[in-house]
Amino acid sequence: MTGDRTFEFLKQLETENELERFKDFLNSPFHVKNASNYLKLIDGMYQFYESPNSKSEQQLFEYIYTGEEYIRNKSSKRLSQLCVKTNQYISQFLAHTKLQQSPHQLNYLLFRTVNERGLNIIPEKQRRDWQSDIISDVYNLNTFLHRFRFEKEEFETQTRIQRGRSAPPLLINSIQFFSQYYAINRLWLTCQLKNFEYIFQLNAEEIAPYLFTLEEMETFLAKHKLSSHPLAKIYLRVYKILIDREDYDSFEYLKETLMEQSETFPKDMAVELYTYIANFCIHVLRQERRSDFFKHIFEIYEDQINKKLLTTNRYVPIERLNNIIGAALNLGYIDKAENMIEIGCAQLHPDLHRSAKYYFGAMCFYAKGEFDEALGKLRYVNRQTDGHFEMGGKVLEIRCLYEKNEFNLVDFRLKAFEQFVRQNRQRISNDLRKSYQGFITICKGLIRLQNNPNINEKRVQKLLERLKTTQVTHRDWLMAKINELMISVAG
């Protein structure tokens, strides 16, 4: 009789209420589509197969397929196919039940499944399903690991800051999840958390239990027999440059590895590793004032843009391209900068193409000393399309006017800029706001000295000392202007 084995399997599910939970499993659209026939099969078998006779199979068929004629061979084949599929669902249900007792494995396997299928978001109808807690957990994990790539921008909206600040708790949860099962993932996430400690100035005591000392990381690698694992070696080097911002050996190792072997990494991993070494360069440039790192960061960015590894997203962030152009111009590579504008602007969001070309073109004219041409380009920049154009455009305009000795106009622009920063303080990160406010303060000091008939070396020196202790953006330019003023006064 067709379906005997299936009925035996169902009878084994009667203990511990498993049969009812199996029906719930079938009812879930996450596991089964169009479950009605399978549920009818179960009910029908308990009606007609408990005390079987020669009519049991026909009665079962007519119960499931109401109104259809029973034709022995053809109908038996349909019942057999339904039973085979039911047996498969019983196996899946038993595996699922076992996985439910090991939530770490379940989370990991579901996460892998979502990722392999390329799902960017789990539909709401599934999240409302009876497994909503499990799916929501995987949704959050997937959001962090693959969709959420925080990139520190020069102009950050409040929403981006909130997203960034909500990430560390999820990072910590992920670290706890991976710590027992997937050592390489644990290393990766620990590097992320250490990086976020710098970006968001997290409470060191709160996150310390989830971070390694260098010795602890080496012990962790040895324990999991990963000391010689190529990827573990890379993340160990990453962790070293995050802990010690003077570990130039690890920086050189990572830079050489990426520039020579970046194609061997998945794209998202390569982009992330490039970001770590680029941020190391930025830190050295800001804190150590090592101008030789302009060449390092330009080589890194140039390699990224040529290999289309600036971002994992569809479009390159405007701030990243700005860093590339700025690095080239700091090195005097005006031709390379103009070439990068053509290559890079094509990788930006289409809404930014036109304004970006004018904005970066203005930067190139400024580097050539053609300040009127630079100001002319800035007039065509739509500063409302992106906050970066708003902030960067104001600074570049002030610098151009200063170079033209239009000090009264500079003073007017500084006051307007200061009001803008104050009114938009909720949209600008604290660190960035302090840097721009510092720039405004030092510039105001320069203008006061330029307009002061009693200027002397002591007053210029006082402004220079203030610059050394003030958090500012465009520090090198401010330093150069103060030094020029000092030479002028001394002469």
Image (cartoon, rainbow, N blue to C red):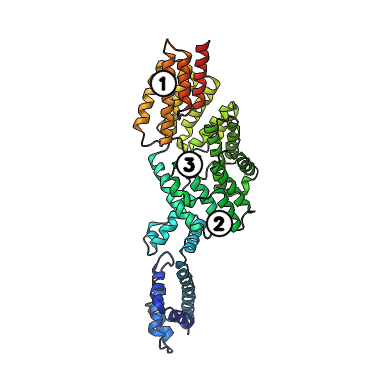
Instruction: Please tell me which residue lies in front, 130 or 278.
Output: 278
Mark 3 and mark 1: Cα distance apart in space: 30 Å
Tell whether 282 sits left or right of 163: right
Residue beneath disc 3: 198
Tally of marks: 3
- Mark 1 or mark 2, which is nearer the start of the sequence? 2
From the top left corner, tell me how far across and down residue 158 is, in percent: 38, 40
Dot 1 surroundings within 10 Å: few (below 14), some, or many (20 or more)? some
Q: Residue 27's quadrant in the figure?
A: bottom left
- Mark 2 or mark 3, which is nearer the start of the sequence? 2
The three-letter amino acid code for the residue at tag 3 is: Tyr
The three-letter amino acid code for the residue at tag 2 is: Ala
Instruction: Please tell me which residue lies in front, 57 or 185.
Output: 185
Dot 2 surroundings within 10 Å: few (below 14), some, or many (20 or more)? some
Q: Residue 389's quadrant in the figure?
A: top left
Residue beneath disc 2: 183
Q: Is residue 117 visible?
A: no
Q: Secondary structure at mark 1?
A: helix
Residue 444: give its label. Answer: 1
Mark 2 and mark 1: Cα distance apart in space: 53 Å
